Amino acid sequence: MAKDVIIACDFSGAEETFAFLDRFEEEKPFVKIGMELFYAAGPQIVREIKARGHRIFLDRKLHDIPNTVKKAMRVLSALDADIVNLHAAGTRAMMEAALEGLTRPDGSRPLLIAVTQLTSTDQQRMESELLIDRPLEEVVMAYAKNASLAGLDGVVCSPLEAGKVHEVCGADFLTVTPGVRFAEGEKGDQKRVTTPAEARRLGSDYIVVGRPITQAADPVAAYRRCVKEFCHDC
Ligand code: C5P
């Protein structure tokens, strides 16, 4: 499994995003486009970043009835992103419909991964608001298993859950993990964080890193440090 660093481009518009990406002269980082940028700049931003030679994780977290998700996935598939995602809470029927919508006439498709429980949801809120009274880790693993049974390629999860997800769903089932910080860095609003090197040791396949790179004084150096710590055994 190839390991890679995905930069979360949480910017409010195309201009800011391209100014950021222009700083990378030697490499073409894998880029995550989330809700903020997609809503601000529209689908065209995906085509433009792709045309510049970047791979793209389109973080849209779809969750609706199966037919609606299937048709939305058909549209997203035409944008030629490399990874797209949805909420596993939409059930296996929704995930299967999503895969169908995503698959192009020639059989190719982007990778499809599922959000299990958001890392902002804790045990207490899951019990009191979602009325799920099982341990959080058990819920995450059950949702990951549902995603795997539906034919998806992996999940978004914490690096701390990556090893267990691989145990439950297999070594080839992708774990894409946000919540990464440098050893001496600010945590911000992330609660359970690991360093890139720890994420590697814990079995993450891709780390998603936002502010430690986008807000760094030298983003290119910060990106290279992430790649060095995560992709190379050091
Ligand atoms: O800036 P930071 O490194 O915290 O960015 C993490 C990125 O990963 C953000 O785009 C955030 O929306 C996303 N993410 C997350 N936790 C999840 C799912 C996605 O932090 N469970």
Image (spheres, helix red, strand yellow):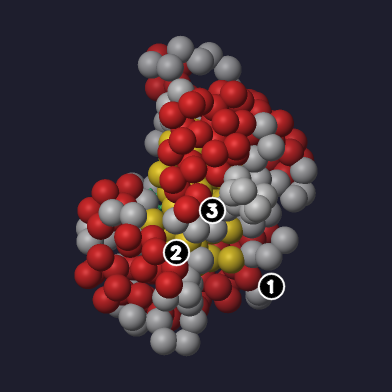
**On the rendered structure, is 112 left or right of 182?**
right
Task: Check disc 2: other Cα within 10 Å, few if <14, some if 14-19, many if 20+.
Answer: many
Question: Residues under labels 3 and 2: Cα distance?
Answer: 10 Å
Disc nearer the start of the sequence (1/3): 3
Q: Position of residue 104 (x, y in %)?
A: 59, 49
From this view, report whether residue 59 is shown above or below residue 2. above
Q: Is residue 19 visible?
A: yes
Residue 32 percent across, percent down from the top left: 43, 58
**Residue 39 on image: x %, y %:** 26, 49
Residue ID at (59%, 24%): 93
* Residue holding disc 1: 233
Quarter of the picture containing the N terminus is bottom right
- Label 1's element? loop
Q: Which residue is mark 3?
A: 83
Q: How many marks?
A: 3
Residue kind at label 3, given as amino acid type: Ile
Quadrant of the image containing the C terminus: bottom right
Q: Are marks 1 and 3 in contact (CB under 8 Å)?
A: no
Where residue 125 sits, quadrant-wise, is: top left
Mark 1 or mark 2, which is nearer the start of the sequence?
Answer: 2
Q: Which residue is mark 2?
A: 31
Q: Amino acid at mark 2?
A: Val
Q: Residue furthest bottom?
A: 26
